[in-house]
Amino acid sequence: MSDDRAERIAEFIEPLRVAPGSTVRLERDFDPREKAGLKKRKAADLLRTGVELLAEYQSRLAAQDTYGVLLCLQALDAGGKDGTIRHVMSGVNPQGVRVSSFKVPSSEELDHDYLWRYAGRLPARGEIAIFNRSHYEEVLVVRVHTENLVRQKLPDSARGSGVWKRRYREINDWERYLVDNGFKVVKIFLNLSKEEQRARFLKRIDLPEKNWKFSAADVRERRHWAEYQRAFSKMLSATSTEWAPWYVVPADRKWFARLCTAAILAHTLMDIDPQYPQMPEAARKELLVAKRGLEREAPTGMPADPYAARHPSGRDARTSGRRAGKKKRG
Ligand code: AMP
Ligand code: MG
């Protein structure tokens, strides 16, 4: 990593990272209202810079075609997952990104092992995959509402009292396998306060164009707030690993959550530091032969190489043998 942007980003996100092996208690350890002394306007500038950075790195990731990135986003209802994805990924080439949302599993999905549906949505090399909800639902909603576990048709031996511990281990092992094979795994929990959730629900009810985002089930889930906080705390404690860390992002201020998410993703990409492939010398010579052929085809009055003519000091211009006069255009 050559530039000091990387260092500044690493410093910015460090307080959000859950240290592997630590015991998290959400309400005690993380403040949903935190904003690191930033103001909204300044954050908007920083986010714009971050989005540009992401675009640059994503392009290199795709060109190198060696590593992939999996970003898992978890949050309670109204935590801001959709808006965060929309803003953070606004500058990247859609061909290099795939977003998957996970809902209540279908009967086909329930007929398989619990990681099956997530495995089918992993990134290819060169891609960034975003999980809007993820395999972590298997130790969150399934833990809070254990009737979900019953629906999974597990053999008796797989649903005993040790099931959650075992799932943590299986998830850690699965992620390690992915990381060992070139797929970076990064996990973000958008940490919303109960009061901010209440406010956002009310806004969804008050504004007709937001009604579709709200369902009565959301209010029922809210009654399990404390159980979810416990399930999140246990999950964060057990599955933040050296190879696939969790970040707890303060989510009461959407602009801050978006900035943090962009920074975490940028950090992940800068750590990979993907490079554009270098042409081998022989292939480069072949290109120059093709170039000369194309230059000979120039109609009279046209520059031999229009690009080189327009960029006389550019890299490509230097390889140009002949250069016809630049023709002025309107
Ligand atoms: P939404 O993200 O608002 O569209 O809601 C998706 C719903 O699917 C949420 O209520 C989740 O709790 C639920 N869900 C996601 N994954 C699972 C799962 N593995 N088992 C049961 N419910 C799930
Ligand atoms: Mg919902």
Image: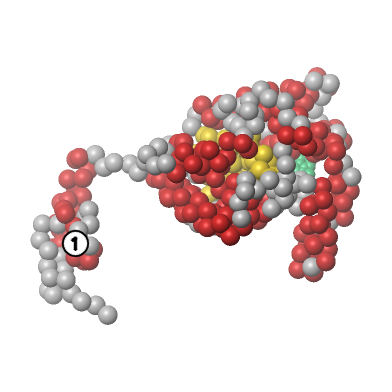
Position of 15 with respect to 290 (left or right) is right
- The picture places residue 264, in percent across and down from the top left corner, at 56, 42
* On screen, residue 83 above or below 74: below
As drawn, which residue projects farthest toward the front?
Answer: 37
In front: 326, or 151? 326
Name the residue at the left extreme. 322
Report the label total: 1
Q: Position of residue 307 (x, y in %)?
A: 23, 63
Image coords of residue 30 (percent x, y) = 72, 38
* Residue type for callout 1: Pro
- Left or right for 24, reference 64: right
The residue at 79%/68% (across/down) is 207
Q: Based on the displayed image, in which of its 4 quarters is residue 14 positioned?
A: top right
Crowding at mark 1 (Cα within 10 Å: few <14, some 14-19, many 20+): some
Q: Which residue is drawn at 19% across and 47% down?
A: 286
Secondary structure at badge 1 equals: loop
Name the image quarter holding the N terminus.
top left
**Residue where numbered disc 1 is placed:** 312
Front residue of this view, candidates 119 and 93: 93
